Amino acid sequence: MTAERPLAPWDLPAGHPGVTFLTGPTAFFALARDPRFSYCLYVPNDHTPDGPPLPLVVTVHGTRRRAEALRDAFADFADRHNVVVLAPLFPAGITGPNDVDSYKLLSPAGFRPDEDLLHMVDEAAARWHVRADRFHLHGFSGGGQFAHRFAYLHPNRLASLSVGAPGRVTLLDPTTTWWHGTADMKEQFRTDADPAALHGLPVQLVIGENDTDATELAPDDERRPVTAGTDRIERINALHANWREHGIDARLDIVPGAGHNHFAVLPAVQRFLDTQVSASPRPHAPEVPRP
């Protein structure tokens, strides 16, 4: 790991070719803490170190890991609202040759993707003028699984939350163990589920009205079958009801005519974020020590 300071766009003279890698759609950067993981950004071309730090929107890929395409789909949004967008990449095959799901569940052997994302945010703040204490988090499908579980572990790092069409959901349930419920969160993650910490957080659940095909869902473990529903519509409704029962004021947006297609629901996601990125920030999150 190098101690070299990361260059910011304003460290380079105008016209320097390095500026093009640090603004607009950036290159992928390896995470210094663990180079198995990387991230790319969209940074408005007129980004400067002056004024308040820009809001940060983090958007998490699904199983097919189209991080770059997802980042590009937020480019116009970023320019229009003067925000920075960060898209992490959690490659397949991290915990074994057939692993495609470990980043979604947050608790595989060997790595913590939630903590890796926080380190990506810290690295982005060291190079660009962005707000790192709280950020806006969106994920769809596998990314929606990641996003709602991340919110249980790090509610005080979020400025808003958008969860799209998760194939498997973790309900706030103190009688059922992870990932179906939250009974053993303390043992797994050194923190308990705290629904009250999500009270007041702007939350969107979003799904296409035709997202009813269950053929791509992970098969149930016969020892612990999923009880939240048989398809994504049923499961997101179960999550919505569970959160409302715990005082989390989540809105549920069902996109007409859309199936399981991230890019078809993005307009609804960006309408939700339109308001959030310009809203007054919630109070500063306390520092949480991380290894």
Image (cartoon, helix red, strand yellow):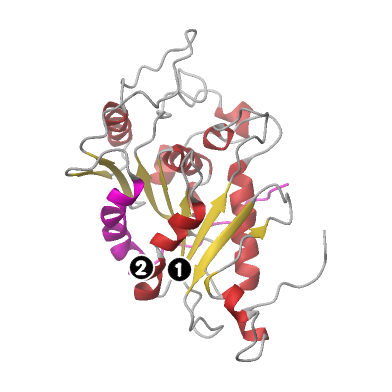
Q: How many marks?
A: 2
> Residue beneath label 2, please?
77
Please tell me whether mark 2 sits on a helix, a strand or a loop. Answer: helix
Against 256, residue 287 (above or below) is: below
Foreground of the two, 259 or 195: 259
Mark 1 is surrounded, within 10 Å at the Cα level, by few (under 14), some (14 to 19) or many (20 or more) other residues, namely many
Q: Which residue is under mark 1?
A: 55
Write the residue at 31% across / 25% down: 231
Q: Where, by quadrant of the figure, is residue 106 drawn?
A: top right
**What amino acid is found at the position of numbered circle 2 in the picture?**
Phe
Q: Position of 158 compared to 38: left or right?
A: left
Is any part of residue 282 visible from this angle? no
In screen coordinates, is 226 left or right of 92?
Answer: left
Q: 224 or 153: which is nearer to us?
A: 224
Amino acid marked by disc 1: Pro
Q: Is residue 132 above or below residue 204?
A: below
Q: Looking at the image, do the residues carrying marks 1 and 2 touch, with CB atoms under 8 Å apart?
A: no
Camera-near label (1 vs 2) is 2
Q: Residue at x 61, y 34 (%)?
A: 189
For residue 70, side relative to residue 100 (left or right): left
What residue is rendered at 45% in x and 37% in y?
145
Q: Which residues are magenta?
A: 262-291
Q: Residue furthest bottom?
A: 14
Q: Position of residue 198 (x, y in %)?
A: 40, 45
